[in-house]
Amino acid sequence: MIKPYFSLLRLFLITSMLLSGCAIKPSAPLNDNIHIITSEQRTEQLLKNKKWQLKGKIAFIQLIKNDKSNKNKRESASITWQVNEKKQTQELNLTSYLGINVLHLKSNKNQHLIKVDGKEYRSANLSQLIYSLTGLTLPTEALAFWLKSLPYNTDDEIQIDEKTQLPKNLSSYYHNAFWKINYSNYQRFNGLEMATKFTFKKDDLLIKVAVKNWSFID
C-alpha cells in the first residue's frame, strides 16, 4: 500500500535529497580498547536505565522490486526521542533540515497524541493510530527495546559477537510479521557501548537510523 504510506512520509521532508545526511556509512571498526563485559551484564545495565534519549537521523526506504527505473522511494528526517520507561512516557520529534517540526508524538501511558501538518490525532493504541495515518504497521512497542539491542519477545533471536560480546543482529516476529535488525558502529555513551547505526527490515520496507548521541538520565 504505497500511496497512504507516502502521504505521511512526504510530510517528513521537502525533498528526498536530504537522505544524504542520513546515509549509513561503512561501519568503523570496533575499538580494541573497549571495556568488554558479557552480554548478560550489558543487558542488566541497560534494563536499569529507565530514562534515555537519542538524537540522530532516520530514513524510510520503500523497496520497489518491479519498477523499471529500479529506484527506491526514500524519505528522511532528524529524530529526537526521549523515553521514561518507569513513568511510561515518551516524546518523539521529527524535523526537516530547516528545523521545521513535521511530526510530534507525545505519550503518557496508554494515551498517545500525534501532531502532524497542523492537525492532532489521539488514540489509546499507538500502532493502530500510526496505521490509520500511514497504512503501515510499525513495531512501536518493540522499538524501545530493539534500539538498545535488547530482545522484545522471549523468542527473539539475537546474535552476539564472540569477541566484543555486543549484539550484531536480531530477528523477531512482531504482530505476525518478520523483522530483521542489524547493529553496527558501537560507541561509548555513559559507560555503555551503544550501536549508532541500525537497519530495520520488513518485507519491502527498510528503515535506517543513524544515532549521533545516546543519553542515559538518572
Image (tube, rainbow, N blue to C red):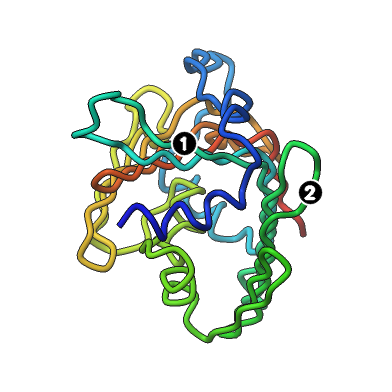
Which disc number belongs to residue 218?
none
Q: Secondary structure at mark 1?
A: strand
The kind of residue on which mark 2 rests is: Ile
Callout 2: 10 Å neighbours few (<14), some, many (20+)?
Answer: few
- Give residue 38's position: percent from left, percent from top: 43, 38
Q: CA distance from mark 2 to mark 1?
A: 19 Å
Residue 191: x and y, percent? 67, 38
Q: Quadrant of the N terminus?
A: bottom left
Give whichever of 70, 107 is nearer the camera.
Answer: 70
Q: Residue, x 42% and y 76% (percent of image)?
A: 128
Residue underneath mark 1: 74
Res 160 → quadrant: top left
Which residue occupies 56% across, 52% down?
A: 45
Image position, residue 99 (x, y; %): 80, 43
Earlier-in-chain disc, 2 versus 1: 1
The C terminus, quarter of image: bottom right
On the rendered structure, is 117 left or right of 179? Answer: right
Q: How many marks?
A: 2
Name the kind of residue labelled 1 in the image. Arg
Q: Please identify the residue farthest to the right as the structure is shown.
A: 99
> Which of these two is toward me, 193 or 4?
4
Query: Do the residues under discs 2 and 1 have CB atoms within 8 angstroms?
Result: no
Residue picked out by circle 2: 100
Q: Looking at the image, which is closer to me, 208 or 35?
A: 208
At label 1, counting other C-alpha atoms closer than 10 Å, the crowd grade (few under 14, some 14-19, many 20 or more) is many
The quadrant holding residue 159 is top left
> Is 74 located above or below residue 163 in the figure?
below
User: Can you give x and y, in whole percent of width and height, for residue 161 in the image?
Assistant: 34, 28
Q: Is residue 109 above or below residue 194?
A: below
Closer to us: 197 or 134: 134
As drawn, 45 above or below 127: above
